[in-house]
Image (spheres, rainbow, N blue to C red):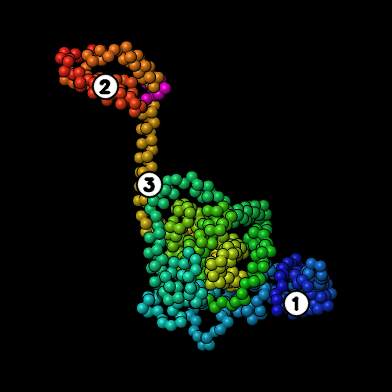
Amino acid sequence: MITPRFSVEQDEARVYVKIHAPHVRAQTLEFDVDEDQFKFYASPYYLRLTFPGKVVEDETSSASFDAAAGDISVSLAKQVHGENFENLDLLTSLLATRREKLAETSQGEERVRRPVIEEIGAAISAEDQMAIMNDEEFDWELPQNILDAASEPLGINQTKYGFNEQYNGFLTHVHSTTNEINEVADPESVSAEERRQNRIATEDAKFDDGYYMDNYINDEDIQPLIQYKTEYYLALRKIQKDSKRADTGSQPGAENTSSSAGSDKDTVWGEFTESEQKTMLDLPRRAHMISNRQAIYLGLVDILFAYALDYRINVGEPTVESAWAIGAVSSSLSNLEQFSSLDSVIVSCFRRGLAYPLYRNWELCEKALEDVYTILKLGRRAILKCMLQVKDIFDKHDVYYIYSKIYLDDYCVWLQTAASEKAMCSLAHKIHGFEVEKDSIGWKLDRLEDLALESSESEAESEEETEAEADAVASTGISTGDGLDNIAGDNVKDTQKIETLSIGDEQQIRMPGTTPGGPLKKKLVQIIGEDDSDDDDDDDDADDERDRATEHKSTDEFYLG
């Protein structure tokens, strides 16, 4: 059976389902409404939707079929008039079965995730139960014990990786491909602790002192990226302004303000695009039994940071290098990392953000972390839209699509079905108050910045001295052109005087203790300039020979001048 494309909307009284099922006949259309479930069948299409509330098929219900467009429009009445059905735009959630819905029960505002398979008689401590019941009570700073390589179990469970550490075998031949994201020597056999140690060593080797210093001083191209206002920043600002305006404008309706603010958060990004809806429909139907929920949220922070940094560097327009850029900065994708604390994931994000991208600047990394806070603050719809964009980038690459299979697909499903809004808010709050120390990065960044400033100051002083010397030369009042003209004029006068000498005079004008013509020639060269003719050199040689032949005839020596 084929699941057709569909969309769901609502008003206070009704639910509207629009189905795109081309090439079917009207007489084959079948509908069934059973409390919270709606079913549609027309070979080869089958659609089953499970709503958050109950609907009824009464005399006001209707269905219409546009054969030309292949669209079927169904209108169903709500059993409770005015009830708001949440998450109708999360299509994967609507496709869940009743059993899957029951696995996720609600108690007031608290959410409990029940695994599909439960161990009968397994004891759950009160602390674990409270952690499940209160997602916002996560201690994001609490590190977990990590097994060393010697104590890890042998066999098939040794090399799990990916979302919830549930995959293996996907990277068996990674080194025979052009995968430049992967940094793990042998993904199918290296332990988690070895991957972490190798990642840190690779980052240390990759970090370039000169590159960082240059981006610290010459940041003309980086500052506009730091000042850039992303679309999710503008969306959050709009929500905050609307909420403040509502609070100041109508005090009696204060109770409705919070609910309207939550509604704005859901709609401020607009509806999911047709492409995003198609992507959600194509996602695999999976019910996750999360073994380490905290690690899932921390991995989400890691991928969102890499996405936000690339988004800011490219001013919101992904490039052909975006898949590599996101994968290289994300430790989850490049090193199959699983984090145990918020501190460890943020330090890793900054280290890779200063070692791999085109621009490696501390302020730029801080802005990317602020972007992660903003996205988390907007809620899981905003997060889902970002992750769908990341998935789209990786799906279009011939090699890197594999990361959609082991990470991004599951994240997109999990965000629709099991992610907790309270956990997201708690995580956003922790990130907002988190201060990253440069010493924690491990590369002596303060010292490098001081050296960069000293080098910049010395270059500035050298330029000032050069300019001062140029000004001093200019203050003498003699331009370069005037100096050349004066020298040329003196040379002309000296040449005219020399031309008046006769051969006899030339024989008698010589320096003491020298042969005729020797020192005189050197003096004349200094006055007239260098000879540029080989013929003149030949004539001088002939004169020297003649002078040596007649030297014995002259016994008187005269001093020049």
Main SS category, magenta section: helix
Measured from the top left, where is residue 297 in percent x and y? 52, 68
Rendered residue at 15%/14% (across/down): 555
Tag 2, which secondary structure?
Answer: helix
User: Viewed as shown, does residue 20 lie left or right of 147?
Assistant: right
Q: Which mark is residue 543?
A: 2
Q: Does label 1 or label 2 sit earlier along the sequence? A: 1
Rendered residue at 70%/75% (across/down): 3
Q: Which corner quadrant of the image does residue 412 belong to?
A: bottom right
- Badge 2 amino acid: Asp
Measured from the top left, where is residue 366 in percent x and y? 48, 55
Mark 2 residue crowding within 10 angstroms, few (<14) / some (14–19) / many (20+): some
Quarter of the figure that contains the C terminus: top left
Where are the magenta residues, as a range?
Answer: 473-482
Q: Which residue is mark 3?
A: 452
- Badge 3 amino acid: Ala
Mark 1 residue crowding within 10 angstroms, few (<14) / some (14–19) / many (20+): some
Q: Which residue is mark 1?
A: 40
Q: CA distance from mark 3 to mark 2?
A: 64 Å
In magenta stretch: residue 481: yes
Q: Does label 3 or label 2 sit earlier along the sequence? A: 3
Q: CA distance from mark 1 to mark 3?
A: 67 Å
Q: How many marks?
A: 3
Q: CA distance from mark 1 to mark 2?
A: 117 Å
Q: Relative to 509, say whether 305 is above or below.
A: below
Pick the front one: 159 or 103: 159
- Badge 1 amino acid: Phe
In magenta stretch: residue 315: no
Q: Nearer the viewer, mark 3 or mark 2?
A: 2
Q: Does label 1 or label 3 sit earlier along the sequence? A: 1
